[in-house]
Amino acid sequence: QVQLVESGGGLVQPGGSLRLSCAAEGNIRSIYSMAWYRQVPGNQRDFVARISSSGSTEYVDSVKGRFTISRDNAKNTVYLQMDSLKPEDTAIYYCNADLLRTFIRADYWGQGTQVTVSS
């Protein structure tokens, strides 16, 4: 059994900051990439940022220079530091992990955490 447990969402004013966390728990042998996606109700789930097991990162253009993804491999945890937040960043943020448990490699998703940017 594997689950991704997210935390850190909330309400923030434009220009503010939030830090999301996502911990992978369970019978995990190895985690390859970890990522964040976001979804506005009624729209598709969109890619935000990804970090590989070696630490290389990639971001969607709209968050470059404002968001920073990082991970703590010892804790199987990924973080998303979000600065200079804009109202258009409002969405449900989902954590994703590409991981190996026993002999099965698969994608796992967190339950989602709401981020609202509003004055």
Image: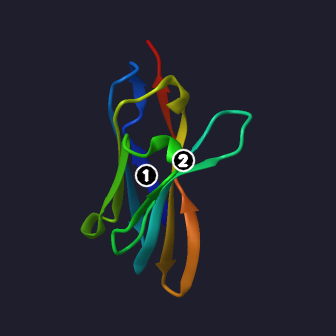
Residue lying at the far top of the rendered structure = 119
In which quarter of the view is residue 84 placed? top left
At 40% from the left and 20% from the top, the residue drawn is 14
Image quarter (top left, top right, bottom left or bottom right) of the C terminus: top left
Q: 45 left or right of 50?
A: right
Pointer 2 residue: 111
Would you name the residue on which mark 1 appears? 5
Q: Is residue 26 above or below residue 111?
A: below
Residue drawn at x 38%, y 44% as measured from the top left? 67
Q: Is residue 26 visible?
A: yes
Mark 1 or 2, nearer chain start:
1
Q: Nearer the viewer, residue 25 or 105?
A: 105
Local crowd size for mark 1, using a 10 Å CA cut-off: few (<14), some (14–19), many (≥20): some
Q: Which mark is residue 29?
A: none
Circles 1 and 2: CB distance less than 8 Å? Answer: yes
Question: Where residue 5 sits in the image (x, y, percent)?
Answer: 43, 52
Q: Tag 2: residue type?
A: Gln
Q: Label 1, label 2: how many angstroms apart (C-alpha)?
A: 7 Å
Residue 43, x across and y down, in percent: 72, 38
Direction from residue 8 to residue 94 in the image, left or right: right
Q: Nearer the viewer, residue 49 or 107?
A: 49
Q: Nearer the viewer, residue 66 or 22?
A: 66
Using the rendered image of the protein, determine whether residue 28 is visible from the camera's viewpoint.
no
